[in-house]
Image (cartoon, grey):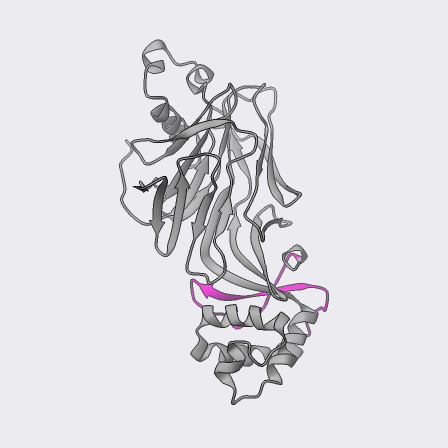
Amino acid sequence: MRTRTHARSRWVVIVTTAAVCGALGVGPAQADEDPTEVAADLIADVAPDQGQVVEGIVEGDQIVVEVGLTEVSIPVDPDQPIVIDGPSPVSAVVVNLPAEVTVEKARVGDDGTVVYHATDDGASAAVQVLDNGSARLQTITPDADGPHEFTYTFGEGTLPVVNTDGTVAVIQQVGNATLTLGSIDKAWAVDAKGKAVTTSYRVKDGALVQTISPSARTVYPVVADPMFTYGRAVYMNLTGKEWGALAAGMGATGVGATTAACLGTKLPAAWAKAVGVACTLIGVSTGITAFKSMLKDINDWKLTPSACYQVQLAGVGGFRGTLAKVDAKNCL
């Protein structure tokens, strides 16, 4: 039995079908049920259990859900974007419902699922926010004639990067650095029986595209899901060569100019913005000291000039003054 939870949480987006009753082969009595509840029940039945759905609060033309320091604004109008904001001084992450769905205004189910019903025979959309703070963007394809590819576009300045392990980094360019603001789990999809369906991500023209590849044994509808996590941690990404340049630049600011250097006033403009954001996340009073301590070790670490390395600026555990090598695509 589903229960309502009032808490702050991450967000999830789910796409369902307008013809979900027919697709599942339900009887006349079930077909008379509220289609919003039918959609929510379908998701609950076949999608992986990744957390409790959390109800939002209707504020004007938005349904707002908060989890910790992360806030998700879900629009009633499907043509408006979903906005995920957090404590980071950089801009919020903005994502649109898939371009392949044609849907009506949102309705809210008993469990907090926000459903956008299809106005054609294709896919519908629904948004859930989970109590683990993640946001899951899912699609449900009603039949073999329905859409099997879904395109998610982001706000200006935000780019998805598919890593070699199948996960996706959500990044923004800040000065000379790239900040990783969130991540998307590996793609998954299941059919009406809960059986795994082959699916994958790719990036096309700055958008994230999820493709579903059913087999002859796939039972429709198929539920697929990109799950977003935003604001848990913020990472600064630079190549080995760029870390070396930043270390040299920070060293030239002088030990006594702590606050000024952290705010970027003694650095070239290209570095000033990145360092200013980083120090805001770390804390201006200690940021420059923390950076200097880390950057002193850069030369000893013998970084590969063309490789990409990141440092955690904020999130669980706070600032971590060591570099981790990541997929090269995370450094633009």
Q: Quadrant of the N terminus?
A: top left
Estimate the x, y position of residue 172 in percent, counting from the top left: 57, 57
Residue at 37% over, 57% down: 69
Estimate the x, y position of residue 212 in percent, counting from the top left: 59, 30
Q: State how many labels appear.
A: 0
Front one among 157 and 178: 157
Report if residue 318 lies within the magenta region: yes
Q: Is residue 332 left or right of residue 95?
A: right
Q: Residue furthest top?
A: 28
Say above or below: 253 vs 192.
below
Front one among 281 and 64: 64
Q: Residue 76 sits in which quadrant?
A: top left
Report if residue 233 lies within the magenta region: no
**In this orientation, does residue 49 appear?**
no
Q: Residue furthest front?
A: 60
Estimate the x, y position of residue 22 in percent, counting from the top left: 44, 14
Q: Quadrant of the C terminus?
A: bottom right
**In this orientation, does residue 279 appear?**
yes
Residue at 34% over, 55% down: 68
Estimate the x, y position of residue 81 in percent, counting from the top left: 48, 41
Q: Which residues are magenta?
A: 301-327
Q: Residue 99 sits in which quadrant?
A: top right
